[in-house]
């Protein structure tokens, strides 16, 4: 691969991990610890490693679409990717920053739809790019169920 392609991969990974860094500013605190949670809530130590892998997969997925078509050729799918990335960060802000599981539940449903739309748009461009977003969609599905239960219990 040429230098442009490697720089592109680096850029997409940096973008995804920048979103992760922004979202990680809103962390569970004593407020979250005091909430009633379902027994199937994963231990706190699970979230970091899972999200690290997911953000890496997201970056590679976007890179594959960009590499094949460029920004001009994949404007729609890459815009969808940007929208879901902003929504991804937004969920952390709404849930942990605003301490609002109810509003976060609405936000995560919108995020889920945006991820699905991005996955479909990417899949149409390149199956591997779409497939790389499947674990992300599944994890956010689980997170939405967890968000719902936390909202319901509290």
Image (cartoon, helix red, strand yellow):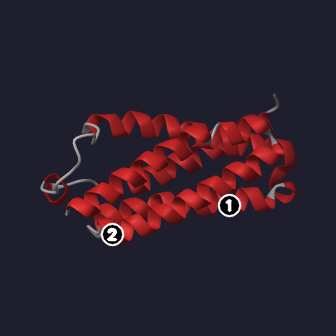
User: Circle 1: is it few (<14), some (14-19), or many (20+) Cα within 10 Å?
Assistant: some
- Dot 2 crowding, Cα within 10 Å, few <14, some 14–19, many 20+: some
Where is residue 30? Give x, y as percent: 13, 56
Hey, which quadrant is residue 48 in on the image?
A: top left
| Residue drawn at point x = 38 percent, y = 59 percent | 92
Left or right: where 149 falls relative to 16 = left
Q: Disc 2 vs disc 1: which is toward the camera?
A: 2
Cα distance between the residues tagged 2 and 1: 25 Å
Q: Which residue is mark 1?
A: 80
- Which residue is painted at 20% across and 56% down in the image? 32
Ranked by sequence position, the earlier of labels 2 and 1 is 1
Q: Residue furthest top?
A: 1
Number of numbered labels in the structure image: 2
- Residue 34: which quarter of the image? bottom left
**As displayed, is residue 13 above or below residue 76?**
above
Determine the secondary structure under disc 1.
helix
């Amino acid at each position: 691969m040429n230098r442009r392609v490697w720089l592109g991969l680096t850029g997409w990974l940096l973008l995804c991990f920048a979103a992760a860094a922004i979202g990680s500013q809103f962390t569970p605190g004593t407020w979250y610890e005091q909430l009633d949670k379902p027994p199937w809530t994963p231990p706190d130590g699970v979230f970091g490693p899972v999200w690290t892998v997911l953000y890496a997969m997201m970056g590679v997925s976007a890179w594959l679409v960009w590499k094949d078509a460029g920004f001009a050729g994949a404007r729609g799918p890459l815009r969808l990717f940007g929208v879901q990335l902003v929504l991804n960060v937004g969920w952390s802000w709404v849930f942990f920053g605003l301490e609002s599981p109810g509003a976060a539940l609405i936000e995560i449903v919108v995020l889920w739809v945006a991820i699905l739309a991005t996955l479909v748009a990417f899949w149409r461009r390149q199956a591997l790019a779409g497939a790389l977003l499947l674990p992300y969609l599944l994890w956010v599905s689980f997170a939405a169920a967890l968000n719902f239960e936390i909202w319901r219990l509290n």
